[in-house]
């Protein structure tokens, strides 16, 4: 029986990929390289340091460990300039009624995000107190597709993976949910077809639509 919904943050509740793109592109340009929107798509759900490694590799740029740390810090400062301006108008369509309905049905709500900025973003958009559990990148030692983020979320709620549905916009996030034994709902793209169910977004979506679409 499903007892909780665990939401990825970036790409499910808000669209921060556009801010990550601007900040990463600025960083790539600063080291004499560039970065495309197509490449940005591949970084969804990927941790900050792994994203940096990929961008440097794609640009053929080599840096020392200390230089990489500086670049990641600088990118995060640029990124935070954008997220500190966010407000509740950036909550994606359909999320608020979906959370209300899920709560009214007695489902527990959690966030499972790779982002170290997840709590800041949830505070900015006024949703921090809507979730019983928030697992963010600061608590993780392993990145998606490892299921650690969702396992920690389920454990903190006292639930088993097969009692939780994970909502994810990233292929690696769906992989993480499936490998941990969670129900996985893909939100958006064509690359999420391996999830138990896929929705385009949360517009007019109800918790019962999800519960009925999952395999028994
Ligand atoms: P930060 P999610 C992920 O969040 C993003 O999808 C990914 O693009 C980003 O690199 C990662 O967080 C780390 O973010 O630099 O803020 O720690 O989708 O797992 O909520
Ligand atoms: Mg995401």
Image (cartoon, rainbow, N blue to C red):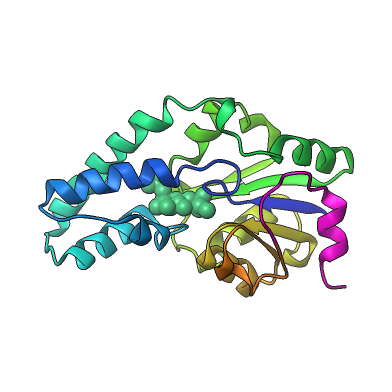
Depicted 193 relative to depicted 62: above or below:
below
Residue 160 drawn in magenta: no
- For image coordinates 52% across by 27% down, the residue present is 124
Quadrant into which the N terminus falls? bottom right
- For image coordinates 59% across by 48% down, the residue present is 12
Q: Nearer the viewer, residue 158 or 111?
A: 111
- For image coordinates 67% across by 50% down, the residue present is 201
Q: Which residues are magenta?
A: 199-216
Return the x and y of residue 188 as percentages of the image width and height. Answer: 60, 57
Q: Nearer the viewer, residue 38 or 49?
A: 38
Return the x and y of residue 76 as percentages of the image width and height. Answer: 31, 40
Residue 137 seen in render: yes
Quadrant into which the C terminus falls? bottom right
Q: Is residue 35 left or right of residue 65?
A: right
Q: Is residue 139 left or right of residue 193?
A: left
Residue 2 seen in render: no
- For image coordinates 27% across by 57% down, the residue present is 52
Residue 208 drawn in magenta: yes
Return the x and y of residue 174 as percentages of the image width and height. Answer: 59, 66
Disc tally is 0
Q: Is residue 103 left or right of residue 75?
A: right
Q: Is residue 52 left or right of residue 150?
A: left
Return the x and y of residue 40 as percentages of the image width and height. Answer: 37, 56
Q: Nearer the viewer, residue 103 or 21?
A: 21
Q: Quadrant of residue 117?
A: top left
């Amino acid at each position: 029986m499903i007892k909780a919904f665990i939401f990825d943050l970036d790409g499910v509740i808000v669209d921060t990929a556009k801010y990550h793109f601007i900040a990463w592109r600025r960083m790539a340009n600063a080291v004499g390289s560039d970065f495309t929107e197509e490449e940005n798509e591949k970084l969804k759900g990927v941790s900050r340091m792994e994203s940096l490694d990929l961008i440097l590799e794609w640009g053929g740029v080599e840096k020392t460990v200390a230089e990489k740390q500086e670049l990641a810090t600088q990118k995060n400062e640029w990124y935070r300039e954008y997220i500190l301006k966010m407000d509740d108008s950036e909550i994606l369509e359909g999320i608020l009624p979906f959370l209300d309905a899920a709560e009214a049905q007695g489902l527990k709500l959690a966030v499972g995000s790779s982002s170290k900025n997840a709590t800041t973003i949830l505070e900015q958009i006024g949703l921090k107190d809507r979730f019983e559990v928030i697992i963010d990148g600061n608590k993780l030692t392993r990145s998606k597709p490892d299921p650690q983020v969702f396992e920690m979320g389920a454990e903190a709620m006292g639930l088993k993976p097969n009692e939780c549905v994970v909502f994810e916009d990233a292929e690696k996030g769906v992989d993480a949910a499936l490998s941990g034994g969670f129900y996985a709902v893909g939100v958006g793209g064509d690359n999420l077809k391996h999830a138990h169910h896929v929705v385009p977004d949360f517009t007019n979506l109800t918790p019962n639509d999800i519960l009925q679409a999952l395999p028994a």
